[in-house]
Image: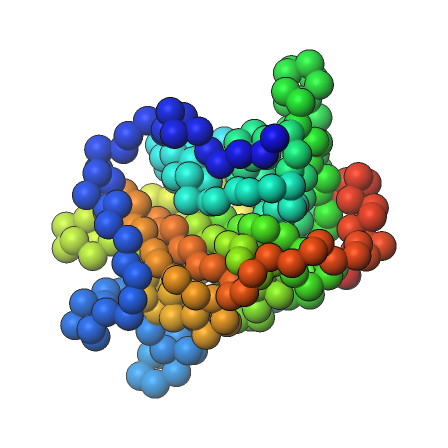
Amino acid sequence: MSQSPAENDQPIRDELAATDDTPHHDRPAASTRSADCHSARDSHSGNDTTPPLDKSGKRVREMFRQIAPRYDTMNHLLSLNIDKWWRRKAVDRLKIKGDAPILDMCCGTGDLAIEIADRAGSDVRVIGSDFCHAMLEIARDKEASRVIDTSGGAGRPTIPFFEADSMQLPFTDDRFQCVTVAFGLRNIVDTDQGIREMVRVCRPGGQVMVLEFSQPTLPVLKQLYGFYFRAILPKVGQWLARNDKSAYEYLPASVGQFPCGEALASRLRDAGLDSVEFHPLTLGVATIYIGTKPGKPSAAPEKTATDQEADQPLKMVAQ
């Protein structure tokens, strides 16, 4: 039977985040918004003179192709392994019920999809999608190794991984009980279109969850965070990846130009989600956003050809 995450399976507590568990539900007064998070629909409008970041599909896909082999190692090292705890906290927020499938969009090397599948139970199929073939190959190998190491995958379905455009997902409307994305929404050319696609394929009554980097508000931490992202991370990332440092110059730029806090929560509401709330983690370095698609769950829709072929990993779709 599928189940919600076990109450006794709680992640190791991050003491820095101990005071970050209070959810933010409704639109706060303007004075409570972080000055560091863009609240405008377009972060490059008005008096913002920062040049727009090139997030064209070709550029971003090639960038992630280059760093794919060492992507996991770099992320765990540069975040001091806190990124694993963030994903576990995100999965804690999901209300997994019944046997309807779950989609992890922009799944990268598959860490969040695998965490969800391990927690969801044997009746729930988790599907991963991403537009970078090299990242999906690693996700596929990681999942295959897990199945071998656990003598059949501990009884849960194997995760199929699809190469897909997140602005035009190849799935029917109202298909998934949960649609998630971790550290990938900011890489989509059109953020709002990516959110709309997540909402479209989510079932009524289901959840849309976003885990994304954000910007701390405490003055000292804000300065240290900014220095680390601008001066240290690109150099360490280049040394580890042994390639052009542009990938790790892109990261701080993409975080700095991406909406966070109430600004991103507002976009989720505008896309049609109810009960939107956000939970800062580790003093605001990352944030979980979660909302519910209005309506009551209905009978599962008929499967499309892509849905029916979900057992064929790395199938080319929507390109």
Does 198 sit left or right of 172 as displayed?
A: left
Q: Residue furthest bottom?
A: 46
Does 214 sit left or right of 291 as displayed?
A: left
> Looking at the image, which is closer to me, 167 or 133?
167
The residue that appears at 18% across and 67% down in the rendered structure is 32
Coordinates of residue 315 in the picture (x, y in percent): 80, 47
> Looking at the image, which is closer to me, 194 or 251?
194
The residue that appears at 39% across and 62% down in the rendered structure is 275
**Visual colour scheme:** rainbow
Does 135 sit left or right of 90 as displayed?
A: right
| Residue 225 seen by the camera | no
How many marks the image carries: the answer is 0
> Looking at the image, which is closer to me, 70 or 171?
171
Coordinates of residue 47 in the picture (x, y in percent): 31, 83
> Looking at the image, which is closer to me, 239 or 25?
25
Say which quarter of the image contains residue 28: bottom left
Say which quarter of the image contains residue 71: top right
The residue that appears at 42% across and 55% down in the rendered structure is 290
Which quadrant holds the N terminus?
top right
| Residue 150 seen by the camera | yes
Which quadrant holds the C terminus?
bottom right
Coordinates of residue 189 in the picture (x, y in percent): 57, 67
Coordinates of residue 158 in the picture (x, y in percent): 71, 31
Q: Is residue 67 above or below residue 196?
A: above
Say which quarter of the image contains residue 236: top left
The residue that appears at 19% across and 43% down in the rendered structure is 19
Q: Is residue 71 above or below residue 195?
A: above
